[in-house]
Image (cartoon, grey):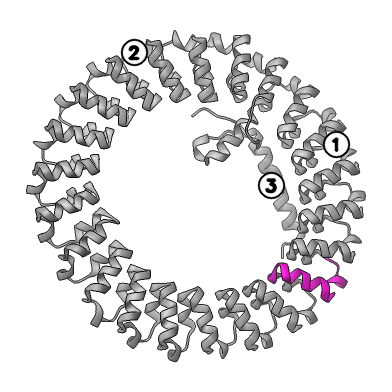
Amino acid sequence: MLSRVHKIWCASVRSSETESLVTDGCDIHEHNDTTAELRKRSAALRYAAEGLKADREVVLAAVKQNGAKLWNATAALKADRNIVLAAVSRSGLALEYAAESLQDDKEIVLTAVSRDGDALWYASEKLQADREVVSAAVAQNGEALWYASQSLQGDRDIVLVAVKQCGDALANVSTTLKANREVVLAAVAQSGRAIQFAAPYLQEDRRVVLTAVKQNGDALQNVPERLKSDREIVLAAVSQNWVAIEHASEELQGDREIILAAVSQNGSMLWYASPNLQADREIVLAAVSQNGNALQYAAEEMRADREVALAAVTQSGNAHAHVSPKLEMDRDIVLAAVKQNWAAIEHVAEDLQADREIILAALEQNIDALYYAAPGPRADRDFVLNAVAINGGVLRYCAAKLKADREVVLAAVSQNGDALRYASADLRVDPEVVYAAVAQNGNALWLAGAHLKSDAAIVMTAVKQSGDALCYAAPNLKAERDVVLAAVEQNGAALWYASSELKADREVVLAAVRQHGDSLRFACAELKADHEIVLAAIESHEGALQFASEELERDRQFVLAAVQCNGAALSYAAEELQADREIVLAAVKHNQLPLVPGKVCPL
């Protein structure tokens, strides 16, 4: 149960986190795509000049997108009823930033708590005691009962709504209602752990306890000791959640049906079983089928049971370490183990480390499996041809003569271009081998012989597969228009590696910024002042404006066009334009993604 102080601390952290999102910088690559997108829309008001934060139209447009932007508004606008109503309609917790007078406005507070019950915290004391407001809040989030007045925490109807929505809200109800059987039953039916908040005599009520453990078996820890010896209750608890076995009486931890229910959910619970049950074939099979490593808790005769061992290693290859020595050399068991976990091959007998089928099964998961294989297969040409077809990287562990075998290496690099690094020196300068490698992985070009980095056909193939491969091309090809164009169409950032002449080529740069706006940074100064190119870059990424010429950053008409293309670009405009009402309003209106407070930073 959270204390009141802890609740206030949590809410304070939440509030301070919201504020820090408004003011702190962040690298958008550090978060998932959704978070990065969410941040884009909040930049417009964040970068608006202080004067515009007092502009009613600008703020209204902002809070209609993201209620939390009310935080940025002036005190006068935080007292504007229409603005606050728009804000809480979008985000109930925006009530926190409203003027005190509006935190006492019933319509506004009702709107807020209907959106987010926790907004009740920011309501006036009068409205925290308003039955209609509190009912709406707890219907949305039962835990909002915590913020209700003491009298309403004792209102049976409101409390029933709250605990049906969130059983743990029972923690916040009056002492009288914690002793109300109907209320407690409703609470534990929603959250079994809520039984800990019930009156002591109801924690002894068998029906209440059964209801609780059927909802959450872990609630068994909160019931009196005598009921932890009640077979029906413990069986219900363990059937719902295996963790409950830890709280059962010692006697019931030896009950066959209860242990079977536990190990069927978590095989490791076999550890709790009595020696007799650890030798029970049905129980052990159920345990190892759920968690193969539970085999370590089984009786010795069970670890020597072929069917049990096979079930265990099929579920977890690591279980091979726990099978009886009598079965360690069983081929079917070893094969099943490495199919589930390739690393099991490290610990099997040497004879089986030379078994082609077992090695191939392991290689399908990880090429390092060949490292543990016996020397014979690694020098076997037919076997290696099959292996490199699975993953060319296994060439690394093959015999030296096979690293110089053209057919083997071709097969390897066709599957994994990076395998070229393991080929003999002669084959790394073989045009056909290198061509096959870069067709699979353009960046394998770095492994090619110097003269092949000047081969137009090979380099073109490489950059079409990975634009970054332009980095490894010979200087003459970094100045070859067709090659560079192909590279930037695949990855705009490849413009970095282009010759100075091509960084000034309008078509090449336009293709680059359309693929990724930030590649504008690599363009020549003249093209950083080209309206079409910079707008195309901004459309791809709002941060591109920072790489535009200073003239464009200060060009009012251009910045207006830029924010209409991507409102978050406002953050990179000249300071005086961040105070331009028309531009800021356009920026706020031209963001089409959901919002959270935050700051958009350059890559």
**Residue 186 falls inside the magenta stretch:** yes
- Nearer the observer: mark 3 or 2; the answer is 2
Could you tell me the amino acid type at mark 1?
Ala
Residue 24's place in the image compared with 230, above or below, is above
What are the residue bounds of the magenta stretch? 173-193
**In the picture provided, is 221 more to the left or to the right than 501?**
right
The residue at 43%/22% (across/down) is 519
The residue at 60%/80% (across/down) is 247
Whichever of callouts 3 and 1 sits on the residue coming sooner in the sequence is 3
Total numbered circles? 3
Residue 551 rendering spot, x and y as whole percentages: 55, 8
Q: Which residue is mark 2?
A: 502
Q: How many other residues sit within 10 Å of disc 1, few (<14), some (14-19) or many (≥20)?
A: some
Depth check, front residue: 106 or 289: 289
Depth check, front residue: 289 or 75: 289
Q: Which residue is mark 1?
A: 99
Could you tell me the amino acid type at mark 3?
Arg
Q: Main secondary structure of the magenta part?
A: helix
Whichever of callouts 2 and 1 sits on the residue coming sooner in the sequence is 1
For label 3, the SS is helix
The residue at 15%/36% (across/down) is 433
Whichever of callouts 3 and 2 sits on the residue coming sooner in the sequence is 3
Q: Marks 2 and 1, Cα distance to the nearest angstrom?
A: 58 Å
**In the picture provided, is 484 more to the left or to the right than 38?**
left
Residue 8's place in the image compared with 94, above or below, is below
Q: Which residue is mark 3?
A: 14
Residue 385 rendering spot, x and y as whole percentages: 15, 51
Residue 490 lies in what quarter of the image?
Answer: top left
Q: Marks 3 and 1, Cα distance to the nearest angstrom?
A: 19 Å
